[in-house]
Image (spheres, rainbow, N blue to C red):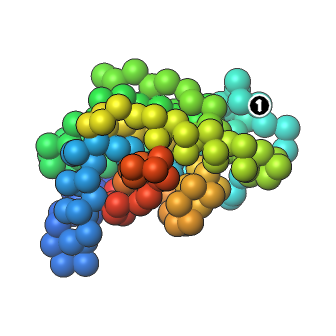
Amino acid sequence: MNRRHALRAMGCLMLQATGAHAGNTIALDALRSGGALLLRHALTEQGTGDPPGFRIADCSTQRNLSAAGRAQARAAGEALRARDVTIDAVFSSAWCRCIDTATLMFPGLKVDVLPALNSFFGSPGDRERQTAALRQWIAALDDGRRVALVTHQVNVLALTGDGLAMGEAIVVQADSRGDVRATGRLLL
């Protein structure tokens, strides 16, 4: 089995609701009823953050998806579709690794940049403002709407308190008070 097939199988297995991944059923059911699939971008080239002097408008200056990350994103999207999960809209951070993850996972859907998903890794002073904006955005989703939000580890941690590995996802929904709560974790 080549690496591509192994990654595809891994993505499908991680979405199966068996054994250690039984929590996937809860998360998938919650997402089907409406909410946000909050994803950390897929696997990248080595390192954390971006190289000094990177520019958002120039992907060649950023840390980008690796070949394994591109395969991981495609496999995760295929696994979601195989489990009959429909996503109505896709939003991403402006970083190329997030846009690429979203595009590969959800081919055919338009990917819109949502500034509240942008990384504040290099500017932690933006943490509270961006997290509040993202919380409000999720709380304002129409009932039953299912969206995918592709972002960065710092953003997920600030919103949910959960640290996700590259390619992991968590389903979040707003409660009746507008507070955002995690309803389940997916290993994509």
Where residue 29 appears, as percent x and y from the top left, is 20, 54
The answer to which of 145 and 25 lies nearer the viewer is 145
Q: Disc 1 residue type?
A: Arg
Q: Evaluate whether residue 161 shows in this view.
A: yes
Task: Identify the residue position indicated by label 1 in the image.
Answer: 55
Q: Residue at x 19, y 62 (%)?
A: 25
Where residue 22 appears, as percent x and y from the top left, is 21, 72
Q: Is residue 184 above or below residue 21?
A: above
Q: Which residue, as the protein is rendered here, is positioned at the far bottom?
A: 19
Q: Residue at x 43, y 43 (%)?
A: 70
Q: Secondary structure at mark 1?
A: loop
Where residue 127 appears, as percent x and y from the top left, is 73, 50
Q: Evaluate whether residue 107 shows in this view.
A: no
Determine whether, in the image, residue 156 is placed left or right of residue 109. Answer: right
Where residue 34 appears, as percent x and y from the top left, is 28, 42
The answer to which of 38 and 72 lies nearer the viewer is 38
Where on the picture, by quarter, is residue 63?
Answer: top right
The answer to which of 68 and 180 lies nearer the viewer is 180
Q: Quadrant of the C terminus?
A: bottom left
Q: Residue at x 30, y 36 (%)?
A: 143
Q: Is residue 102 above or below residue 2?
A: above
Q: Is residue 5 above or below residue 89?
A: below
Q: Residue at x 64, y 45 (%)?
A: 132
Q: Is residue 116 above or below residue 175?
A: above
Determine whether, in the image, residue 66 is placed left or right of residue 186. Answer: right
Determine whether, in the image, residue 79 is placed left or right of residue 153. Answer: left
Q: How many marks?
A: 1
Query: Circle 1: is it few (<14), some (14-19), or many (20+) Cα within 10 Å?
Result: few
Q: Quadrant of the N terminus?
A: bottom left
